[in-house]
Amino acid sequence: MKFRSVFDIIGPVMIGPSSSHTAGAARIGKMARQLYGRPPQWAKVHLYGSFAKTYQGHGTDVAIVGGLLNFDTYDERIKEAFDYAKEAGMEVDFIEEEGSSDHPNTARIKLGDETGEFELVGISIGGGKAEITELNGFELRLTGESPAILVMHNDRYGAIAAVTKVLAQYEINIGHMEVARKEAGQEAMMVIETDGRIPEVAMEELKDCEHILQVVTISE
Amino acid sequence: MFKNVSELIELAETEGIPISEVMIRQEVKETDKPREEIFAEMGRNLDVMEKAVEEGLEGVESRSGLTGGDAVLLRKYMEEHESLSGNLILDVISKAVATNEVNAAMGTICATPTAGSAGCVPGVLFGLKPRLNPTRDQMIRFLFTSGAFGQVIANNASISGAAGGCQAEVGSAAGMASAAAVELAGGTPQQSAEAMAITLKNMLGLVCDPVAGLVEVPCVKRNAMGSSQAIVSADMSLAGVTSRIPCDEVIGAMFKIGQSMSPALKETGEGGLAATPTGRELAKKVFGPALGSE
């Protein structure tokens, strides 16, 4: 049985018109904002496939900008997201890409400010669900449906064990975990989806672990 | 957990409870959440639906300009003329159209079961409200009953236009609404199932062919037609008319029809109305030549 809850049928509450092109797009933007960890000063959004062809009619653009402003999929401010972005001093560009992508509803988002840049790829897979498939050149799969943490670290012995030890200490169960690196011994990344929220003290402890460069959290 | 309509009806009949109660009890069991919390959550969905209806009746326009304002026309006609189909049907369809126009205009809606078919259930519910004067409790139960029947379709066929065509979206929504209308009017669980079967039978084969790929043309008007059929089927069932083909078998037929439907007719915007000369012309106007030229 794929559908188990009545709220899969009567719900979700969302800004129209399309669960895949609007609600899913807003989720990609919000995940990007949370992974970046702060409001970006600028964003370049490359749209592929059906996103590139129909984004204006579906409000995919305002939905992504709304997400970048940390708005939820049901936040009415999404409609005026460009005005809110301007107010927040965020410069946004949309680029329609001709080329194909693995998924018809794909967005590549580059974010930045004077301290750093960041790039990810998100796909909208239907029914308002979205996934992040690439982050700063690392391939991964992050759904944003469970609380998650993203850990950038040096590819050294014990880095992964140190992180999971902290989670165990706070009795946080791991539902899904991925590790990726570009080259052995260089910068690496962990994506950990957990069953419960990660308390602030645990986050601080994670940041203090040896070889850990950066820790960010994603939650609904 | 009920797997099909006959199990759902059996549960209601053996326990002597309405379909809505079967759904509420199952949700409690599935989620471990307290009953009050589940009821309150559905109440919030009801509030979103009511707000969308009100907003649409005041008049909205979509970003593409393809839809908006028809709910206002229907209201005006209803108030100024003696309509052919009667004011209850006019009230129902104006509220269904209002909801879908709000969806197309990037307003807030509750997907029932999808965004494109979000008008049928609230259209029927708020259209029946002046006639049946339901309590808030009964209105929330209407949504649980709709959800129970929708869940059976979702698990045995589909509620996605991309997978099953419009029969799976507006078809499902209309069927759900007719079943819930029967319960609200005091019919039996079996009569709810008959109403859904009658509605679905008339929706079989309906393709998903949105112009320019947008959730506007013909989606908005199909919600008007779906909600009016829901009322007619509910009346037929309450009159004692039954479906010769049982509801579960109709759902099975819907699944097979969806599977054999051409991909051009399943939410790709490549066939049906989307591929008509005017459909292509409108697509060009909205997006430029790229999408309309093919």
Image (cartoon, rainbow, N blue to C red):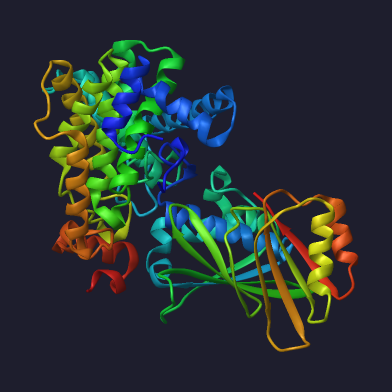
Name which residue lies at 46% across and 54% down.
A22
Residue B37 in view of the camera: yes
User: Residue A203 placed where, x, y %?
Assistant: 83, 57
Residue A34 in the image: above or below residue B218:
below
Residue B122 appears in which quarter of the rendering?
A: top left
User: Residue B121 placed where, x, y %?
Assistant: 33, 31
Residue B238 in the image: above or below residue A141:
above
Q: Residue furthest front?
A: B14
Apparent side of residue B36 relative to residue A170 in the rendered image (left or right): left
The residue lying toward the viewer, choosing from B37 and B105, is B37
Residue A76 appears in which quarter of the rendering?
A: top right
Residue A91 in the image: above or below residue B68:
below
User: Residue B187 placed where, x, y %?
Assistant: 25, 15
Residue B95 in view of the camera: no
Badge count: 0
User: Residue B144 placed where, x, y %?
Assistant: 41, 27
Name which residue lies at 32% across and 33% down.
B149
Residue B236 appears in which quarter of the rendering?
A: top left
The residue lying toward the viewer, choosing from B59 and B109, is B109
Name which residue lies at 10% across and 21% down.
B241
Name which residue lies at 75% across and 52% down.
A172
